[in-house]
């Protein structure tokens, strides 16, 4: 029997490779894991609760509000654009385990340390979950060495270095685990109903957490549907299970996390009626597949059933939520789209990154593209039924994410779940080839293929060696990482927290650290539902003194906060925006702005109190928190 690489039996093999030693592989895995979970990276989290990303900060702010007594169904962030606040589309299903961990740690560590411990532990727990799922799945199909190599490859891929690092309490890591579970459940050559139910239920949970995985869930549905159309009754159980599981999980989870008065309101950025309609359509097709199997319906009949149900789903979706065809950011005005959304790393395209930051583009996106091509090639080449099914499923799910990543980098979050699996398989083949007779060029090609799925390998050839330990990853803020650190120094926010509470007008990315580390309210934060606040912040950052004055009055701001490390700069030949000159000290402060000497020396932040009606005294106000 041949191996996955198509190599001859063991008797034709030559000397053993040193990489076949379990002890050596364990050591390599431990070294790789140390790169991801270096204990020295815990200090910023425990000492200052310095989280990696704006989304992590916003998640912890929401969890704090929940623990402080804000209602389960009250999804409003009341300190963002008060007094009305901004409703969140984020799922309480992620808030719940994080809040539970904080409550469990608080009697032992105190609240501040409990938050730090939770922020450090939560992504590690999810990485363990991913590792267990991948380990069992890969060991069954490819053996213990491939399963172990997954743990070597994963910490060296940019997606995992990003979403599973200490402090990442946003939901992307949970979504990667869900995507992996869906794929492993569907990679069942027998295509049993029970495995379909499991895959569908996890897909429903993933939809409730967030719609980022919708392309993968849709691709999985199309895959099992195509199986049924082609193979009939043999594939009916998997299709029925997937449809029943998807609708059976998403409907109660929607009710669990959504206020009853919003059950009939369609929204495009969270689980709501239009997406439940599609899940119901999947269940309908699944039921029809079981009935068709009993009545021996032919392929033409199966195609007709598929077309009718698909047409009904499309018509219903267009009737209740036609705007959702434009995506989750429907209704965003051009100013916010061009000045904020298009500047966020996650929304930038691969060609854009390739022109401006080739090392970031290659290390983050290229492993996913290589893995996608490898999955497709192996799906066409593999002959063993169970392995062939695995590659077909993985190819069907990784390709949509890879295509999205070419246009918007956020596609890497779902496609990245499969890179460690495919990289481990390729690396295992390369190790096997080292001890097999044959062409040295063939061996080199296998090694290069395996290395091409490691982000650190791309960094090695595109960036200085110092970047090997921490290759640049793509985040959700629009400010470069080095500038972001300067703008979020904890000592400066501790000083801001000592000022009387008020509403702060600042750049969009300063909103989450202000909400997390101070008692102030903010006009804007990088959150697409806060269009009014973000437009105000952009106008203030890009306009004249008169525009800034108008915005502060319209939004009732008490403070103006600027960061010299992240200023909006004018295009060549145009004058600098007023706030840029103000922050750099090239123009004096107008009489309605009072500079405050509240920040530590050397801070990149500058703050002014906004005077209204000839007074610089803050009016008492409720932030609604």
Image (tube, helix red, strand yellow):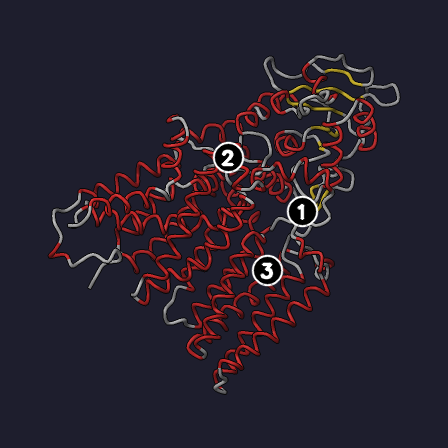
Mark 2 vs mark 1: in front: 1
Q: Which mark is residue 164?
A: none
Relative depth, front residue between 536 and 253: 536
Mark 3 vs mark 2: in front: 3
Question: What residue appears at the point 61 percent right and 76 percent down from the top-left corner?
Answer: 308
- Where does residue 172 sit, x and y in percent of width and height? 52, 46
Element type at mark 1:
loop
Question: What residue appears at the point 35 percent right and 35 percent down from the top-left corner?
Answer: 34
Q: Which residue is tagged 2? A: 116
Element type at mark 3:
helix
The quarter of the picture where the C terminus appears is: top right
Q: Are marks 3 and 2 in contact (CB under 8 Å)?
A: no
Mark 1 vs mark 3: in front: 1
- Where does residue 313 sit, x and y in percent of width and height? 64, 69
Q: Which mark is residue 88?
A: 1
Q: Which residue is tagged 3? A: 253
The number of callouts visible is: 3
Left or right of 581 on screen, residue 398: left
- Where does residue 620 sit, x and y in percent of width and height? 81, 28
Quarter-of-image position of residue 599: top right
Q: Earlier along the polypeptide chain: callout 2 or callout 1?
A: 1
Q: Earlier along the polypeptide chain: callout 1 or callout 3?
A: 1
- Where does residue 560 sit, x and y in percent of width and height? 73, 24
Position above or below: 153 against 587: below
Label 1 and label 3: CA atoms lie apart by 17 Å
Label 3 and label 2: CA atoms lie apart by 29 Å
Q: Earlier along the polypeptide chain: callout 3 or callout 2?
A: 2
């Amino acid at each position: 029997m041949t191996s996955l690489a198509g190599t001859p039996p063991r008797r034709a093999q030559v000397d053993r490779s040193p990489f076949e030693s379990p002890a050596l592989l364990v050591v390599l895995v431990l070294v790789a894991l140390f790169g991801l979970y270096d204990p020295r990276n815990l200090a910023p989290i425990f000492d200052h609760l310095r989280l990696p990303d704006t989304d992590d900060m916003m998640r912890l702010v929401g969890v704090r509000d929940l623990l402080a007594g804000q209602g389960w169904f009250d999804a409003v962030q009341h300190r963002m654009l008060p007094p009305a606040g901004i409703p969140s589309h984020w799922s309480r299903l992620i808030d719940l385990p994080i809040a539970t961990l904080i409550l469990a740690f608080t009697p032992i560590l105190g609240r501040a340390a409990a938050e730090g411990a939770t922020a450090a532990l939560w992504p590690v727990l999810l990485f363990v979950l991913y590792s267990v799922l991948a380990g069992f799945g890969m060991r069954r199909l490819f053996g213990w060495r491939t399963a172990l190599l997954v743990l070597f490859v994963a910490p060296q891929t940019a997606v995992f270095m990003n979403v599973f690092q200490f402090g990442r309490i946003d939901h992307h890591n949970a979504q990667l685990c869900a995507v992996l579970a869906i794929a492993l459940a569907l990679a069942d050559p027998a295509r049993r109903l029970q495995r379909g139910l499991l895959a569908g239920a996890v897909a429903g949970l993933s939809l409730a957490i967030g719609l980022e995985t919708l392309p993968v869930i849709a691709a999985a549905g199309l895959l099992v549907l195509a199986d049924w159309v082609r193979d009939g009754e043999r594939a009916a159980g998997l299709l029925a299970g997937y449809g029943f599981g998807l609708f059976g999980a998403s409907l109660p989870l929607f009710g669990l996390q959504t206020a009853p008065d919003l059950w009939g309101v369609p929204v495009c950025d969270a689980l709501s009626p239009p997406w439940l309609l599609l899940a119901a359509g999947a269940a309908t097709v699944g039921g029809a597949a079981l009935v068709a199997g009993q009545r021996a319906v032919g392929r033409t009949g199966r195609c007709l059933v598929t077309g009718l149900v698909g047409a009904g789903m499309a018509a219903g979706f267009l009737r209740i939520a036609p705007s959702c065809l434009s995506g989750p950011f429907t209704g965003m005005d051009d100013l916010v789209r061009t000045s904020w959304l298009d500047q966020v790393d996650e929304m930038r395209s691969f060609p854009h990154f390739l022109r401006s930051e080739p090392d970031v583009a290659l290390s983050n996106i290229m492993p996913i593209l290589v893995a996608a091509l490898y999955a497709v090639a192996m799906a066409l080449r593999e002959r063993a039924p169970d392995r062939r099914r695995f590659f077909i499923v993985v190819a069907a799910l990784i390709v949509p994410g890879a295509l999205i990543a070419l246009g918007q980098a956020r596609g890497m979050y779902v496609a990245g779940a499969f890179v460690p699996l495919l990289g481990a398989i390729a690396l295992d083949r390369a190790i096997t080839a080292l001890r097999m007779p044959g062409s040295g060029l063939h061996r080199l090609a296998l090694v290069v293929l395996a290395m091409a799925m490691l982000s650190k390998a791309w960094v090695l050839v595109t960036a200085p060696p110092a970047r090997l330990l921490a290759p640049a990853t793509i985040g959700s803020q629009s400010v470069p990482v080095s500038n972001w650190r300067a703008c979020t120094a904890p000592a400066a926010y501790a000083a801001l927290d000592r000022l009387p509470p008020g509403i702060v007008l600042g750049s969009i990315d300063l909103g989450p650290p202000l909400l997390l580390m101070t008692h102030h309210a903010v006009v804007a934060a990088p959150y697409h539902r806060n269009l009014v606040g973000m437009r105000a912040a952009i106008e203030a950052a890009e306009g004249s003194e008169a525009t800034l004055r108008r915005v502060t009055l319209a939004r009732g701001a008490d403070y103006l906060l600027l960061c010299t490390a992240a200023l909006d700069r004018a295009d060549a030949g145009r004058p600098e925006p007023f706030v840029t000159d103000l922050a750099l000290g090239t123009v004096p402060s107008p009489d309605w702005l009072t500079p405050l000497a509240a920040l530590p020396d050397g801070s990149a932040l500058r703050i002014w109190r906004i005077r209204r009606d000839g007074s610089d005294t803050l009016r008492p106000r409720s932030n609604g928190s």
